[in-house]
Amino acid sequence: MTDDRQPADRDRSRSRLDEAAERSGQAVERVRHRGGRAGRIRARQWEIILVISVQAGLAATIAALIAQNLLGPGAHVFAPAAAVGTIATAIGQRARRTFELLFGVGLGITIGDTLRFLIGSGPWQTGVVVALAIASALLVAGRGGALVGQAGGTAVLIATLAPMERGLELPRIFDALVGGAVGLLVVALLLPVNPMRVLDRAAAPIFAVLCEQLAELADALRQRDSDRTRRILDRLRGTEDDVGRLHDSLSGAEEVVTIAPARWHRRRQFHQYARSVSLLERLLLDSRVLARWATTALQYDEPIPPELPDAISRLGRAVAEMRNECRVGDNPQCTRRLVEECAELAGRAAATGVRSFGDALVTGLRTASSDLLRAAGSEPDEANRIVRRAAGVGEAAIRPPARRHLHRTRPTRATRVRRRANLAARRRGDDERAGLPAVGRPAR
């Protein structure tokens, strides 16, 4: 059967179908992207869970053995509990957690014994002891944590069990010492994690997002697709969880290279890579700025010189090169070359002709190039100078600087009279010094 609809109706129906198909494809792409990222995050989480579980089990076993063989008869439950508490705390805070644990136990014992001697034992005395112990711990620490918890828990034990069982104070202190020391021993000597691996795995999602989205942004600018640039901006904004995990990994890796002798040889490499990784958050902010200005420039139908998407593409490649070079400790020559090309293309785009939002995009590219050079190891002044020089080369290639002609201005009458008088005076002075006749008619 033939279609009796008008051509305009058929075009409208096809356009609706095309829009629906495009939206479906975009939704599938977003789900696939999020699913892939979620799978990678789960794999990294399982690895961290396995490492912490093995460390905690080993620490509990060693602490229980030491407490039973060295601290005399008794349950000594607190020694393995303190070891597990040290291991299971946030990575990068284990040394501080151990000192807080020991100080909290000492504070709880001191307050509990003092108040029990002054006011006795009983339900309301227990409440007073715990309240004062918690208040003292909060005044010392300024916030909640291991110190406050251990001070309150130890105060409860002293206030309730000390009247019935004498000598709880010293076993509690020794258990805390054994548990905390064993926890740190496992982390530092027996099973220290590889700090570079921890740091690289935490930074990998951010590097991947930066490289992928900068390449996407370059393609979207070439195709003048503002909806696509807006989606790129949303993806760049959804990296807060990755940034938080990166900060935790930085703290944990720094703790390992500080307290683990087996990892001391990686200190220099760690500090170099940590400096690069710590600037990733600034690069993320720079990329968001680029995506926002690109979206606005396309919405206002501003001209986009082809050099702009090329510069953004170079920036994404420079990010990938920086990760490879800094991870192995090489001199980041390829990164600097790509950054200089990015800045030169930005200068060419500015000289070709851009409007207000395109000019802001050029400024954002230069800022991101400078931050990337700093991440590669350059000092701030050196990075700014390199970017400024490369951008100037790009501008000069499109719009050479005008030559300055030296125009000789005609002197005024007073200036000419003054010059003649000065010249005559010099001649008279020279002639008198040489014993010659005055300048005038030649001597015969």
Image (cartoon, rainbow, N blue to C red):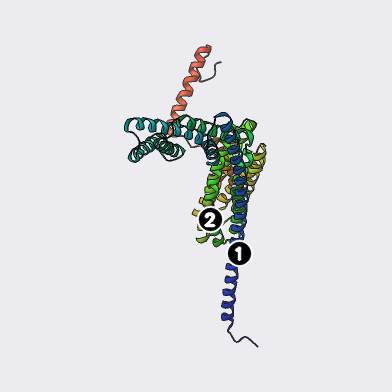
Q: Is residue 318 visible?
A: yes
The residue mark sitting in front, 1 or 2, is 1
- Disc nearer the start of the sequence (1/2): 1
Residue at point 53% right, 55% down? 233
- Determine contact: label 1, label 2, CB under 8 Å: no
Q: Is residue 364 visible?
A: no
Task: Classify the position of the C terminus by image quarter.
Answer: top right
| Amino acid carrying mark 2 in the image | Leu
Query: In this rendering, is residue 6 above or below 172?
Result: below
Q: Quadrant of residue 321?
A: top right
To which residue does mark 1 refer? 28
Which residue is nearer to you in this view: 425 or 97?
Answer: 97
Q: Quadrant of residue 9?
A: bottom right
Which residue is at the far front?
164
Task: Give x and y (percent) for residue 34.
Answer: 59, 57
Task: Give x and y (percent) for residue 287.
Answer: 55, 50
To which residue does mark 2 refer? 233
Distance from disc 1 to disc 2, alpha carbons, whole Å, reads 18 Å
The crowding category of the residue bearing disc 1, from other C-alpha atoms within 10 Å (few below 14, some 14 to 19, many at least 20), is few
Task: Give x and y (percent) for residue 329.
Answer: 66, 36
Q: Is residue 90 left or right of residue 144?
A: right
Residue at point 44% right, 27% down? 418
Which residue is nearer to you in this view: 116 or 94?
Answer: 116
| Secondary structure state at the residue bearing disc 2 | helix
The crowding category of the residue bearing disc 2, from other C-alpha atoms within 10 Å (few below 14, some 14 to 19, many at least 20), is many
